[in-house]
Image (spheres, coloured by chain):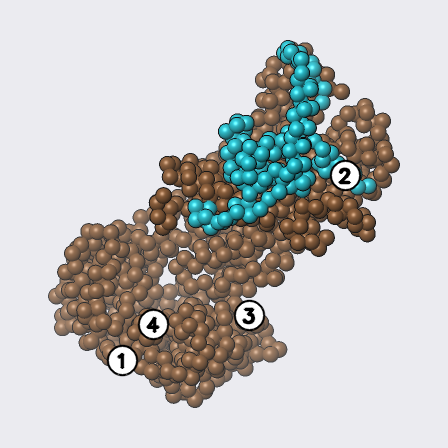
Amino acid sequence: MTKRGGTDDDAGRPGRFEEIVLLAVARLEGEGYGLSVLREIEDRAGESPAIGAVYATLERLEAKGWIRSSMGEATPVRGGRARRLYAVEPSGVRALRHARRALDQLWDGLELKTPRRRAEASR
Amino acid sequence: MKPGADRPAPPRWAERILRATAPERDVEPMMGDLAEEFSRLAGSDLRAARIFYWRHALRSIPSNVPRRAGDAFDALVLGRPAHATLNRKDARRGDDAMTSLVNELALALRSFARRPRFAATIVATIALAISSVTVIFGAVDGLVLSPFPFPDPDRLITVGSAFPKVGAELSFMENLSPAEYLDIAREARTLDAVVAWDMGNRQITVGDDTRNAFSAFWWGDAMPTLGMRPRYGRGFSAEEIRSGAKVALVSSRFFRDRLAGDGALVGRPLLVNGEPYTLIGVLPERTLVYGTDLWIPMSAAPDLFPRGRRQFQVLARIAEGRSIADVNAELDLIARRTESAHRGAQPEYERWRLEARTFVEVNVAFLRPASIALAFGALFVLAVATTNVASILLARAVERSREMATRLALGAGRGQIVRQLSVEAFVLTAFGALAGVALAGQGIGAAQAALSRLPFPLPGELELSARVLGFATAVSAFAAFVFGLTPAWSILRSGRRSSLVAQGIGAHGLGAGGRLRAQRVFLGVQVAFAALLVCCGGLLLRSLARIQAVEPGFDAGRLLGFRTTLPQARYPNPASYAKFFERAQADLRAIPGVEDVTLASQTPPAYFSNVTFLIDGQDAEREGAMKRAFFTTVSPSYFGVMGLRLLEGRVLSPDDRGETARVAVMNDAAARRYFPNDSAVGKRLRVGPKERPLFVEIVGVVSSARNRGLDTSPQPELFATFAQAGYPNQLMTVLRTTLDPVSIVPSVRRTLASIDPLQPIYQVQSLDQSLGNQGLPRRMATSALVLLALFSLALAAAGVYAVSSYVAAARSRELGLRIALGATGASVRRFIARKALLPVAAGGAAGLLGGVFASRAMGALLFETRPTDPLALGAAISLLGLVAFVAADAPARRASAIDPARALAVD
């Protein structure tokens, strides 16, 4: 009874945080690495995830084939440790477009009213 | 950018945490990222930079640990290297040969990855518990249970004596005279390999570096007695001992540190006090008898010493087939024979006793109370931790009851579910144990480093032996695993009466009521143990406060002390000692910042040398009235430098010289004990044997210093001048300074080097420092126990919080109804908190009682504090109550703010 939860069954759609990280990597145009992605998310999305969460997501994005990684150079500021640089793959671009299109279609023509409290009552 | 050397480094512990938790492939880039940001932030605000680093190291744990665990799992079970994780799901899918157990393991890991915080909490709890148990058992094993590397340590004994005529308070004095040693060595049939030894200081020169080495001088080869073989070379031959040959053995530590571990040096000369000795061997690793680094034969044969010269220790091994009772029976016979032969000349032999005790008992007995207390403390923490794990797992089982019910309904057997839960418990325990052992490795190093600051040589060196590790891990892992099975067990029990239909109605899953009951019982147990530990911690802290308030009896501020031992080769007689020390005293006085200088044979708080005497005219007829006091030879400036107050008569003066009448000063502890009814001044004491009596007049009484440590009252003490009692070759020099005492050490060394460049000094420290060192064992034991207590308190608080949240969740509909019917938030809060606080009260009461009992058992660690000390216990229980209240109230407060409509709308 190996019920497979997990994200690979629905590899076509990025999760919310996956989408954010993927967008950050895309924005950084090949210069993305753990810290720059983190800063980008902080600056643009106003969230401050833990660096470990960023890396966990980057690993997942790479496993899905949406981004690729390569090792950069080590600098003294980093205590002699190298950066791992990330760049978006064509399939990643497709996934982002797909996600955006889905959301755009949902937003299209919608005028929001404040929903009543009852709506969220069910667990 | 500043140059590299000044650049602040990221917080070390945060780095360690990161390195220990992050997946292997991400450690380097992640640490690099944080280092980069840290150094950017540190440029303007170091504090912010540190906070940044710590925040990310800690907040990353929940996402890091499951990934690292997944890697470890892959490496361990699937045999894949850790970074091949990227496609592990694909790989696993293809592996049809995997057994269902592996599938269950994978399922367990994935379920933890979904709830990383839950899994991390449990793993951290188990890890901390296992590591504290392991470190403390490692220390107890290394210090008390098997401190020495000697085989059959129970058969290695040392002989002590007791002289009821003299100083009845000393019931086991480890010092025998050479004649007494010879009696035992020749006559005892129940002992093998009887050797005797004495300790002292020698200076060893390696290259142009001369340093003091604590040394042992032997009659006999101790290697067979200890049951060891030298690591290199050989032990002493009988001929070398007989002739007092210039041969030497050194400790492994000395060999490593000062001889660079060069085995070729064995057989070569070694300069001891400037004389060439032949290095014949190196002692085995960890064989540090009282911390001695150099072993040489005694220079004189035992029969050359007078019978009363008791300064030698006897070591022997119990003969094959004999017991320690046989040994003591035979030692008693020997003592009786000596008594009848020598009582005439030496009255102290009347009713004297000889007794054998194991070397281990004699040397580690003083560490035992603290060790036992800490070992129990660790076990209690383990108990709290495991019950805590059990109740977290129970709470989690409640959350998952729907999942379980569904699986039961879909045809999964109860067996399968129980098996899945067991696998989960196993995996959590295994990770906890792994992390715990890794932590313990760090911890034992830290413990060794802390213990090496103790003011006495440790019997053993700590290590994480396979035995300790195996024992501690087995006990802890077993406990954690068994408790981890609680949810499975509760499912098995409740499964009999519940069904999916019941789930639909009961809404809160399998046997929710039973679980709450079990959780509250667990909570009571946790709180009981935590309360016990907190009470003990409170009592120890109170003792510590009491002892720190004790006045040492002398003015310890701004005093610098050091010891000098003059070697026989360059200083052959007392006249040469006097010349050196008097010149040193005068020259040191000239150093800027030095107010005054004095010399003394010993300084508080650690005394060793004493004298027996009779009061002239009062005790002369009754030989049995021998008195004892510590005997300190001093220069006349001693009383001023140490800040002892003159109470009566006068202090010693430079005019008390060899040619004038012998005089002494007494401390008031001696005056009160020996002259309770009249003044001591003017009385005469008779020192020495009847045939050659020496009379000493008491000329003054001074205030008492704590000469046996802060935790014992001042003992009787006599002072005489060097001019009258003679200079020994080993002395303490004490300087009263106007500056920080340690800051003048370089000028002291320079000054002494101008007198004799070859002469080293040692035990250099401020007297404040040496007082502090004396209290160190107590402070260490106290802080270790207080740490354990706080840890258990934190766990218990988590337990209270869990139960309170559980009540709030399980009763949400009922609470909603109550609120809808007009109950106030406060009454709801009380209702919930009461559920959690009832077990706290019961457990707290039990723990308080237990604490009183436990502290009775650790009475040796308490100082002027009764086990029922109201302040300590009251503070401990209040702290516990406060913490429990806060932990219980937080979920209750949240629940009382619930929207009744929402609570009632559930389902």
- Kindly identify which chain the residue marked by label 3 belongs to: B
- The percent coordinates of residue B508 (x first, y second) are 75, 27
Evaluate whether residue B681 shows in this view. no
Q: How many labels does the image show?
A: 4
Q: Mark 1 points at which residue?
A: B569
On residue B440, the disc is none
CA distance for labels 2 and 3: 59 Å
- What residue would you read off at disc 3? B153
On residue B201, which mark appears? 4
Q: Do labels 4 and 2 share a chain?
A: no
Q: What residue type is labelled 4?
A: Asn
Instruction: Give the amino acid at mark 2.
Output: Arg
Helix, strand or loop under label 3: helix
Q: Mark 2 points at which residue?
A: A4
Q: Which residue is drawn at 45% across and 51% down?
A: B780
Task: Judge whether A65 appears above or below B141 on screen.
Answer: above
Closer to the eye: label 2 or 1: 2
Compute the Cα span from label 3 to label 4: 27 Å
Q: Colour of chain A?
A: cyan
Q: Are marks 3 and 4 on the same chain?
A: yes
Res. B764 visible in picture: yes
Q: Looking at the picture, does residue B532 appear above or below residue B202?
A: above
Q: Where is residue B749 in the image (x, y as percent from the top left)?
A: 23, 64
Q: Distance between the residues labelled 4 and 2?
A: 73 Å
Residue in the foreground of this view, choosing between B361 and B699: B361
Q: The disc labelled 3 sits on which kind of residue?
A: Pro
Q: Chain B is drawn in which colour?
A: brown
